[in-house]
Amino acid sequence: MVFRYDSPVGTFTIHPVGSGQFELQIDNAFVASYRSPEAAALDVSLHATSWNEWDLYPGLVAPQSLFEWERRRVHRSLIPPERTKHSFFESVLGL
């Protein structure tokens, strides 16, 4: 299941990345990894994502509950193999 929230500063998505981990993205850019989609949604609502363009504007409101995020089903074969932050930066920065 992929969760999506259209905020005033961009589109947040939470999706599984394997091994029980979930990734929070903003406009398809990696923000952070979480053990649950609920934890990611809570960080978005608390402006505690480590993405300054969102975190520094606490007046922008986001839902605390995933029930208020848009949901999309994802076929299991589309879930990528486990990815670490190191391999993410390798792929982006060509390290």
Image (cartoon, helix red, strand yellow):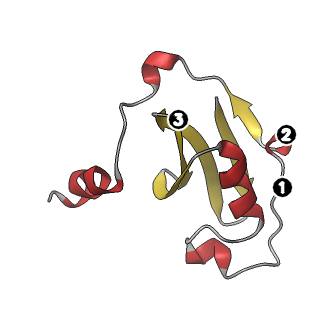
- Mark 1 and mark 2: Cα distance apart in space: 8 Å
The quadrant in which the C terminus is found is: bottom left
33, 28: nearer the viewer: 33
Residue at 70% across, 62% down: 44
Residue at 46% across, 56% down: 29
Amino acid type, residue under disc 1 in the picture? Pro
The count of marks equals 3
CB under 8 Å between discs 1 and 2: yes
Residue at 69% across, 52% down: 39
The quadrant in which the N terminus is found is: top right
- Within 10 Å of disc 2 (Cα), the crowding (few <14, some 14-19, many 20+) is few
Q: Secondary structure at mark 1?
A: loop
- Within 10 Å of disc 1 (Cα), the crowding (few <14, some 14-19, many 20+) is some
Residue 60 sits in quarter: bottom right
The residue carrying mark 1 is 63
Q: Is residue 53 left or right of residue 80?
A: right
Q: Position of residue 10 (x, y in %)?
A: 63, 60
Residue at 21% across, 55% down: 90
Q: Position of residue 73 (x, y in %)?
A: 64, 23
Q: Is residue 52 left or right of residue 38?
A: left
Q: Which mark is residue 20?
A: 3
The residue carrying mark 2 is 67
Amino acid type, residue under disc 2 in the picture? Phe
In the displayed structure, 31 sits above or below 81; it is below
Q: Secondary structure at mark 3?
A: loop
Q: Nearer the viewer, mark 3 or mark 2?
A: 3
CB under 8 Å between discs 1 and 3: no
